[in-house]
Amino acid sequence: MAGPEVKALTATSAPGRIEAARKGANPQRGFTLLEMMVVLLIIGIATAAASVSMLGNPQARKLREDGQRLAQLFIVAQTTAMSSGDTLIWRYAAGGYDFVRLPRQLVLPARLAARGAAAPATVIGGDSPLRARRWSTDDPVSVSVTPDVQIVFDADWVHAPLDILLQAGGHTVHLLRLGDGRYVVRTLDDPPDAARHPPQDRARS
């Protein structure tokens, strides 16, 4: 007579044992959304702390921003020169910089250029991204280019590598033009070295 009772117990207890076996066989679980948010928050705080440590000085931060802005403007200048067929030149001084558009005659062969009337270079202004700008730093900015060449933007996308050195208030920023046409900004808070990087300031007209 005990048979039905044993069967009933077995039928009611089996699901619990099966569920327990399943839990024991797969103990791993994924990250919750809250855990992922906490990890991202920690990474963000660590990154911000590193940035503040590296660029805690406001003038150093402004000089780096100038370098980053220049890198973007150089790409705009190169794109503009390629699309318009014009030749652009970047000019700089202790107080700021601008971009100049050369007249077509000046970029033609000498014999052809001599036939036309000489035209002055045009300073790009107005609302153009390439309009004249002042440096963000409170101190005058010393600029030197290695090798010592004029920075020209024309129909060629890739030019020779350059190292544009920006120095102000004892802070240093390198704007590097790589061989593939990309620009990289590197910050070095070393004292200015006039012997290695003589300033090459040029006044704007």
Image (cartoon, rainbow, N blue to C red):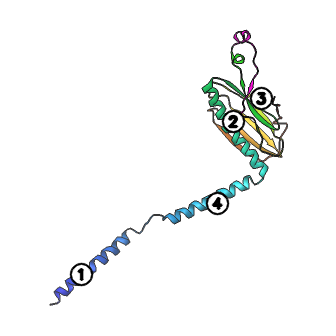
Answer few, some or many: residues within 10 Å of disc 4's Cα (few below 14, many 20 plus, some between 14 and 19).
few
Quadrant showing the C terminus: top right
Q: Kindly report which numbered mark, 3 or 2, lies closer to the viewer in this rendering.
A: 2
What whole-number distance in Å separates the C-alpha atoms at marks 1 and 3? 91 Å
Q: Which residue is mark 4?
A: 45
Element on which disc 1 rests = helix
Q: Residue at x 69, y 42 (%)?
A: 68
Say few, some or many: other residues with alpha carbon within 10 Å of mark 3 (under 14 / 14 to 19 / 20 or more). Answer: few
Q: Earlier in the sequence, mark 2 or mark 4?
A: 4
Secondary structure of residue under mark 3: loop
Per the image, is 113 magenta? yes
Q: Position of residue 92 (x, y in %)?
A: 78, 33
Magenta region, main secondary structure: loop
Instruction: Kindly identify which residue carries mark 3.
Output: 148
Q: Is residue 178 visible?
A: no
State the residue lying farthest toward the left: 1
In the picture, the quarter occupied by the N terminus is bottom left
Q: Which residues are magenta?
A: 109-132
